[in-house]
Image: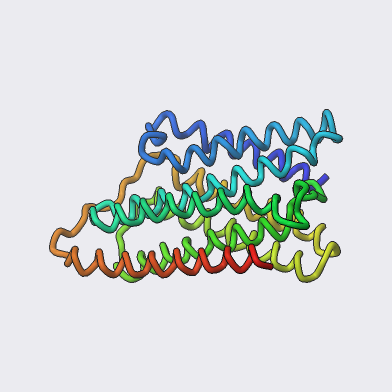
Amino acid sequence: MLTLAIWWACILVEALVVFRAFPGNLLRKYPFFYTYAASVLVCDVLLYSAYTLSPARYPAWVWGTEFLNILLGCGIILEIFKHVLSSYAGAERFARITGVAVFAAIFCFGVLYPMAPGTSQAPSTSGLFGRSVRLERDLLAAQAILFFAVLVVISYFRTAMGKNVRGMILGYGVWLGASVMTLALRFYIGPGFTATLNVIQPVAYLTALLIWVVALWSYDPNPAFDSSAPVEIDHEAVVATTRSALEAMRSHLSKVARA
């Protein structure tokens, strides 16, 4: 009952997040973020309907919706990079290309992985928020590597941010960190941790949603850029940091594919 209540709360707050995109014209400002928000709202409504009206169909729907939202979740990282580096044209372009590469890598891995020997069938699900624990853990870990690179760039340049971008970072960091940690524990501890995972993950996600509602209630752009900053040095540093993160992510996915 607790998990169902949290699920309902998530759907209501998701709807509020999406609704607030229209009064402030935020959809045009943050298209990747709101594509993700709209996707998880639609998917949660469909999954809740399947779970309550046709439980037999629920497991078959879970994998596709989970993978779609993991993929679109990369768009939040791309959105953050876009706005954090908006005053560094060259670096922003490189980050955008890198983001597309991340999309492609995760998409290909998610499509090809089930075709590999021993994984010919769709991943099994368990619990209300059933997961393919190993695959979801590895894809989110790859995403976490790039997210960490964003934090390194922000810390290195002491980038000034508005409330919107700060909220995106904090909310997604809470959910991503909790998801990677709990899925790793579920993989190593075993099915006995599933009940705990099925509470911690939704609570972390609901926390992220509440942060987003507050942070994105109205448009708050990043402060004006200081034109005296050394753009070329910054660009080289951002490129190096992002390239290292992409290489780490690609190495991580390669090791998982060979496992």
Identify the residue shown where x is 54% and y is 40%.
Answer: 37
Q: Position of residue 2 (x, y in %)?
A: 79, 48
Q: Decide which of 101, 143 is in the foreground and name it.
A: 101
**Horizontal and vertical percent for residue 125?**
79, 49
Estimate the x, y position of residue 72 in percent, counting from the top left.
Answer: 53, 45
Q: Is residue 92 left or right of residue 63?
A: left
In the image, residue 247 above or below residue 54: below
Closer-to-camera residue (37/137): 137
Q: How many marks?
A: 0
Describe residue 214's horizontal placement relative to residue 135 as left or right. left
In the image, what residue occupies the spot 80% across and 70% down? 189
Picture quadrant of residue 6: top right
Pinpoint residue 91: horizontal percent, then vertical percent: 28, 58
Q: Residue at x 53, y 48 (%)?
A: 73
The type of colouring in the image is rainbow
**Given the current orientation, which residue lies at the most extreme left position?**
228
